[in-house]
Image (cartoon, helix red, strand yellow):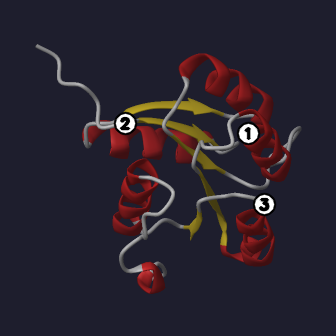
Amino acid sequence: MVAKPLGRILVIDDDPNIVDMVIDYFGSSGYAVIGAHHGGDGLMLAEHEQPDVVLLDLRMAGLSGVEVLQQMKLRWPELPVVIVSGAGDAALARRCLKRGAFDYVSKPFNWEYLHRCVGAALAGPDAVVAGAAQQGA
């Protein structure tokens, strides 16, 4: 008997290595994970696969992460979207938080923090990510 996944994660990042690492990490932890390398593809996958949480890069060719976030919040306002982007994008990430993103996780990832963040996103909108101040650790 196949166990039910802990949750469905959609990762949208134009770096195939990042997508593969996230799929491997969370897949081996019991999540169902799918990936997209472009914002438009990510929106189509979100429509068809109905993920429980989205990990979204900000800087991508074509539709930017900001545009994807705006579209997702219009279509699925309750869908938690976690921004994952480089440290140089902190100001932009803060603006995304004001536009409805659940949280921001900087690259390179602190995998433990990212895992807690995904768990909190799955727990609901009032969940708090434990150890948020230690993200960069």
Pointer 2: what residue? Answer: 7
Left or right of 57 in this view: 49: left
Q: Evaluate if marks 3 and 2 touch, with contact meaning CB atoms under 8 Å apart.
A: no
- Of labels 3 and 1, earlier in sequence is 1
Dot in front, 3 or 2? 3
Give the answer, above or below, for where 30 lies relative to 25.
Answer: above
Residue 25: x and y in percent read: 35, 46
Left or right of 48 in this view: 122: left
| Secondary element type, mark 3 | loop
Residue lying at the far front in this picture: please name it: 126
Nearer to me, 4 or 58: 4
Nearer to me, 1 or 128: 128
Residue 101: x and y in percent read: 67, 58
Left or right of 126 in this view: 97: right
| Secondary element type, mark 2 | loop
Residue occupying the point 67% across, 75% down: 87
Q: Amino acid at mark 1?
A: Met
Give the answer, above or below, for where 90 lies relative to 70.
Answer: below
Pointer 1: what residue? Answer: 72
State the CA–CA distance, disc 3 to disc 1.
11 Å
- Of labels 3 and 2, earlier in sequence is 2
The label shown at residue 99 is 3
Mark 1 surroundings: few (<14), some (14-19) or many (≥20) residues within 10 A: many
State the CA–CA distance, disc 3 to disc 2.
24 Å
Residue 24: x and y in percent read: 37, 39
Left or right of 67 in this view: 83: left
